[in-house]
Image (spheres, grey):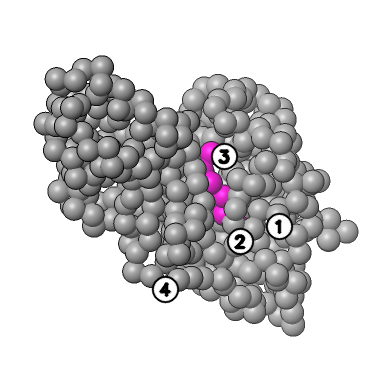
C-alpha cells in the first residue's frame, strides 16, 4: 500500500505529527523500531509527563536557549496553549505547578501516552512497531518511501522524521535519523549533551564528602576563563560522586560544554552563591554577628544553620580559618574571604556526563535547511523533520516537549496540506 505520509518515530513529535497528518482522513503510517510507542514520553517529568509549560510565548522561547526563535512559526501554528486545549479535548485534565509546568492531574505519564495512541488509532493511523528503518528513499529530489531493515519497501508521498536525538538511548533515541538527513544533503551540526550533570575532580568531589548534599534555592554561575559570567541560574542542585547535578546544574551544562569548546579549555569554573538574596556585605555582617552573639562558641558551630553544615569545613579551610576559632580571635580579612566564598564558592568542572546520559541532545539537523513555517526540508521535497532531531534544545521544565509537540503538529499538518 502507498501511504500519503509515513512518520518515523513514535515519540512526542511523531505521535503529534501522526495526529495532525491524519485529521483530514489521509493515509498515514507511523513506524517505530521499538515494541511500543511513547517510550521516552512515558518516563518524562519523573514519570509524570510534563506536557508543556504555561509561560507567555516570549518567556517560553527564552527557556529554549538552543535556537528557540526558530519556533516562532511553529508556535503560531500550535502553541503551548493549544497543547493544553488539545489534551483537555482528549479528556486529560491538566494542572499547573511551579514555574508554569503543566502535568496531567493523574500524575501519570501513561495517561498522556495512552491518550495520544488512542487518538491516532481513532483517526485511522496504521502503526508498525518493531520495524526499524534501513533508509529513506529519494528519487530526483523527492521523497519516494522507506525501506525497512527487513528489506520491505513502503512507498509514500511524504516522510516525516521524528526519530529523536541520541539522549536516553534506552528509549530508542540512538541517532538513526542523522544518516537519513545527511543522505538527503542535510548538515548535522555538532551533537553535544545538554541538560546533563557536570563532572569535576575537585578534592571534595573525589573524596565524596559532599555526595548527596542537596542545596535549595542557591544560584549557580558559569564563568569563562577571563572571569566573565556566562550564565546564572537559581534553584536547587545536588552534589554527586562525580560532580554536580540537579535542575540548575543541568541548565548550566550546555554553557559549560560550549565554553570548554570555545576557549579550548580543559576546565571551566562554576560557582555557587549559597545566599543569592543577600549581598556580600550583608553576608559578612550577618555571619560575624552570629559569632559575636555567641563569642565562646567555635565558628564551625556558629555557622550551622546559616550555611549547609557539610560545607562548613571546606569553606573554613579555603578561607584559612581554624574550625575552633572563637569570635575574639577571628581575623577580619579571612572572615571577609569566607563571606566571599559563601557568595561565590568555586568548583572546577571539566565537562559533563555523556550525551547518552543527557536528558536532551544539543545540535542536530541544521535549521538553515528547514522551512520554519512547515518543517519541510529545503533540500528534499516531501521530507520533514520535527522534534529532537532538529538543532533545537531547551531547558527541562516542559520546554523540549513543547517544541516536539509544536514542530510535530506543524510537520504533520503541512505534509498533508502540500498534497492538495
- Residue holding disc 4: 264
Dividing the picture into quadrants, the one containing residue 225 is bottom left
Q: Tell me if label 3 and label 4 are in contact, CB under 8 Å.
A: no
Dividing the picture into quadrants, the one containing residue 294 is top left
- Spatial separation of the CA atoms under disc 1 and disc 2: 10 Å
In the image, what residue occupies the spot 65% across and 61% down?
385
Q: Which mark is residue 111?
A: none
Q: Earlier along the polypeptide chain: callout 2 or callout 4?
A: 4
- Residue holding disc 1: 70
Membership of 227 in magenta stretch: no
Q: Residue furthest top?
A: 293
How many C-alpha atoms fall within 10 Å of the one at disc 1: few (<14), some, or many (≥20)? some
In the image, what residue occupies the spot 49% across and 58% down?
228
Q: What element carries label 4?
A: loop
Membership of 396 in magenta stretch: yes
Q: Tell me if label 1 and label 2 are in contact, CB under 8 Å.
A: yes
Left/right placement of residue 270 relative to residue 71 reads left
Dot in front, 3 or 4: 4
- Please state the horizontal and vertical placement of residue 57, each as a whole percent of the image: 72, 41
* Front-lying residue, 365 or 332: 332
- Residue holding disc 3: 398
In the image, what residue occupies the spot 70% across and 71% down?
369
Amino acid at each position: 500500500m502507498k501511504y500519503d505520509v509515513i512518520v518515523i518515530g513514535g515519540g512526542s513529535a511523531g505521535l503529534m505529527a501522526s495526529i495532525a497528518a491524519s485529521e483530514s482522513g489521509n493515509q498515514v503510517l507511523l513506524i517505530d523500531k521499538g515494541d511500543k510507542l511513547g517510550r521516552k514520553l512515558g518516563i518524562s517529568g519523573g514519570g509524570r509527563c510534563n506536557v508543556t509549560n504555561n509561560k507567555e510565548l516570549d518567556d517560553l522561547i527564552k527557556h529554549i536557549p538552543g535556537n528557540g526563535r526558530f519556533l516562532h512559526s511553529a508556535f503560531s501554528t500550535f502553541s503551548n496553549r493549544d497543547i493544553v486545549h488539545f489534551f483537555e479535548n482528549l479528556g486529560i485534565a491538566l494542572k499547573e505547578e511551579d514555574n508554569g509546568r503543566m502535568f496531567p492531574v493523574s500524575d501519570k505519564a501513561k495517561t498522556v501516552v495512552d491518550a495520544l495512541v488512542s487518538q491516532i488509532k481513532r483517526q485511522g493511523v496504521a502503526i508498525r512497531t518493531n520495524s526499524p528503518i534501513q533508509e529513506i528513499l529519494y528519487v530526483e529530489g523527492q521523497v519516494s518511501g522507506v525501506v525497512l531493515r527487513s528489506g520491505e519497501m513502503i512507498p509514500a508521498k511524504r516522510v516525516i522524521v521524528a526519530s529523536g536525538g541520541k539522549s536516553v538511548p534506552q528509549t530508542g533515541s540512538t541517532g538513526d535519523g542523522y544518516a537519513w538527513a545527511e543522505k538527503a544533503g542535510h548538515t548535522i551540526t555538532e551533537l553535544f549533551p545538554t541538560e546533563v550533570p557536570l563532572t569535576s575532580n575537585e578534592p571534595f568531589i573525589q573524596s565524596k564528602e559532599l555526595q548527596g548534599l542537596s542545596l535549595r534555592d542557591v544560584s549557580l554561575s558559569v564563568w569563562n576563563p577571563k572571569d566573565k559570567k556566562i550564565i546564572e541560574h537559581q534553584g536547587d542542585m545536588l552534589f554527586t560522586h562525580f560532580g554536580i547535578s540537579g535542575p540548575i546544574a543541568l541548565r548550566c551544562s550546555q554553557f559549560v560544554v560550549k565554553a570548554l569548546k570555545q576557549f579550548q579549555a580543559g576546565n571551566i569554573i562554576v560557582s555557587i552563591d549559597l545566599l543569592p538574596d543577600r549581598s556580600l556585605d550583608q553576608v559578612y555582617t550577618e555571619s560575624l554577628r552570629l559569632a559575636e552573639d555567641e563569642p565562646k562558641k567555635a565558628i564551625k558551630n556558629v555557622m550551622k544553620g546559616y550555611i549547609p553544615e557539610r560545607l562548613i569545613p571546606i569553606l573554613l579551610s579555603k578561607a584559612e580559618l581554624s574550625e575552633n576559632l572563637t569570635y575574639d580571635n577571628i581575623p577580619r580579612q579571612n572572615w571577609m574571604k569566607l563571606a566571599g566564598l559563601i557568595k561565590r564558592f568555586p568548583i572546577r568542572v571539566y565537562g559533563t556526563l555523556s550525551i547518552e546520559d543527557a536528558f536532551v541532545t544539543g545540535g542536530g539537523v541544521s535549521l538553515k535547511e528547514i522551512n520554519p513555517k512547515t518543517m519541510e526540508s529545503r533540500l528534499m521535497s516531501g521530507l520533514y523533520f520535527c522534534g529532537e532531531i532538529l538543532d533545537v534544545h531547551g531547558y527541562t521544565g516542559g520546554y523540549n516537549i513543547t517544541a516536539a509537540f509544536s514542530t510535530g503538529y506543524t510537520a504533520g499538518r503541512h505534509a498533508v496540506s502540500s498534497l492538495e
